[in-house]
């Protein structure tokens, strides 16, 4: 079952890691491996959400999502999107960006380094909003209760996450301007670029969230309409075109899933820029990770079990928050790629370990409860 579901992902992982070694040696191997782990961990909650919706769709639409959806997710968002970001930031054409990356790596690296403040500001704001909206939401399951409980209470204040993100952006841009002024003002114009790029990242997050909400509402409306039609058909004894209704609902499900997948892809792609600027390594790592997300979605649907490790979603969002902070810091200071990737991997591992401990504690508590119940029954029987 596992080999059948994850077989292609395992094969592509091996090819991706070998390609990384051939391309840039063992250091590139490490970067590709970290990007794979980053993409899988950040998209774990995406796979859970996908599985919850995908199981409601018929076989035809499931196949559409797992074929056309893969092309959009892997080639569109994980491979093309990083090139587009570099092209826009460096003010060059996408084809030219790819050509420079392969044939003139030094020139490409120079352009990316020059465009890094705008990329970091855009991505930092986008990731920061994802983290803040998560941490300010009141949840039944809390990982770090001492932190999440008071923050959930603060989250009742409207637009708090947007206000905090804008304050962080203002402080970052002002600090950058001050730093540039102290060093002769050579990059004083970059402070404005940082501010504009950060606002663009914030707007992008709000637009993606709005689209997701729009399609989610449409989906709920279609499901409610289908349910009402079925109830009416039962009362009147008439037949209803279930295929047509299911098709409309499934179509909105498909659109909703693609918008969700695109939004989750943003954090992986933007987070990857905190680890490496090399689009080849980025494409290898994120492409492999995206395949695992699809395989994990299928696995969760077929197994019928979702989210056994309840803190993984928390760990993924804390990793997003850490990457947001790292990106904002890298506007001025260089941080080694291994440290950047290691922070995210450590947070994911910690959340997984916490989930395993929680599951063991719950199992032990249930065992004790069953034992005491059996003892009570025996005593009462005597």
Image (cartoon, helix red, strand yellow):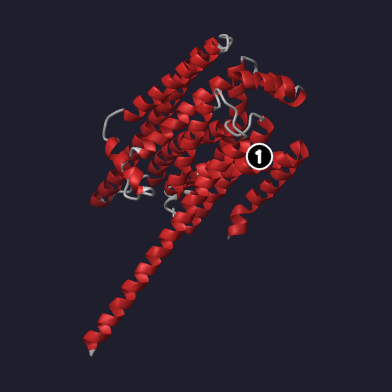
Q: In the figure, residue 97 lies in which quadrant?
A: top right
Q: Is residue 237 left or right of residue 313?
A: left
- Quadrant assignment for the C terminus: bottom left
In percent of width and height, residue 354 lies at 45, 55
For mark 1, what is the residue?
31
Residue nearest the observer in this picture, 261 or 199: 199
Q: In the figure, residue 163 lies in which quadrant?
A: top left
In percent of width and height, residue 126 lies at 46, 28
- Quadrant assignment for the N terminus: bottom right
- Residue located 33% across and 48% down the image: 239
In percent of width and height, residue 307 lies at 44, 53
The reply to whether residue 39 is visible in this rendering is: no
Q: Is residue 271 left or right of residue 48?
A: right
The reply to whether residue 151 is visible in this rendering is: yes
Residue nearest the observer in this picture, 215 or 231: 215
- Residue located 27% across and 39% down the image: 153
Residue nearest the observer in this picture, 218 or 381: 381
- Residue located 57% across and 9% down the image: 184
Q: Is residue 296 left or right of residue 309?
A: right
Q: Is residue 222 left or right of residue 15?
A: left
Q: Is residue 22 above or below residue 7?
A: above
Q: Secondary structure at mark 1?
A: helix
């Amino acid at each position: 079952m596992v080999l059948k579901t994850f077989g292609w992902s395992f094969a592509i992982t091996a090819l991706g890691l070998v390609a990384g070694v051939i391309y840039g040696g063992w250091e590139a191997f490490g970067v590709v491996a970290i990007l794979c782990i980053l993409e899988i961990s950040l998209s774990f909650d995406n796979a859970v959400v996908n599985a919850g919706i995908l199981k409601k769709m018929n076989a035809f639409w499931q196949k559409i999502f797992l074929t056309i959806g893969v092309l959009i997710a892997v080639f569109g968002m994980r491979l093309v999107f990083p090139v587009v970001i570099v092209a826009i930031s460096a003010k060059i054409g996408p084809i030219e960006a790819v050509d420079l990356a392969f044939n003139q790596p030094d020139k490409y690296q120079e352009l990316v380094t020059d465009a890094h403040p705008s990329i970091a500001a855009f991505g930092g704001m986008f990731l920061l909003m994802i983290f803040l909206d998560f941490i300010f939401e009141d949840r039944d399951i809390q990982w770090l209760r001492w932190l999440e409980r008071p923050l959930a209470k603060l989250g009742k204040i409207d637009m708090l996450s947007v206000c905090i993100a804008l304050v962080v952006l203002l402080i970052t841009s002002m600090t950058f301007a001050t730093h540039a002024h102290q060093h002769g003002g050579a990059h004083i114009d970059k402070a404005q670029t940082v501010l504009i790029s950060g606002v663009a990242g914030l707007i992008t997050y709000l637009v993606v969230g709005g689209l997701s909400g729009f399609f989610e509402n449409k989906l709920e409306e279609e499901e409610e309409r289908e349910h009402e039609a079925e109830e009416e058909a039962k009362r009147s004894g008439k037949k209803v075109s279930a295929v047509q209704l299911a098709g409309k609902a499934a179509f909105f499900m498909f659109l909703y899933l693609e918008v969700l997948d695109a939004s989750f892809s943003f954090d992986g792609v933007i987070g990857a820029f905190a680890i490496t600027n090399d689009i080849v390594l980025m494409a290898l790592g994120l492409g492999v990770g995206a395949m695992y997300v699809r395989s994990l979605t299928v696995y969760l649907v077929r197994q019928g079990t979702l989210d056994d490790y309840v803190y993984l979603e928390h760990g993924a969002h804390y990793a997003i928050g850490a990457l947001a902070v790292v990106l904002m810091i890298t506007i001025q200071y260089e941080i080694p790629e291994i440290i950047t990737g290691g922070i995210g991997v450590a947070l994911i591992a910690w959340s997984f370990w916490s989930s395993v401990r929680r599951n063991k504690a719950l199992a032990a508590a249930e065992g004790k409860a069953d034992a005491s119940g059996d003892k009570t029954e025996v005593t009462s029987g005597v």
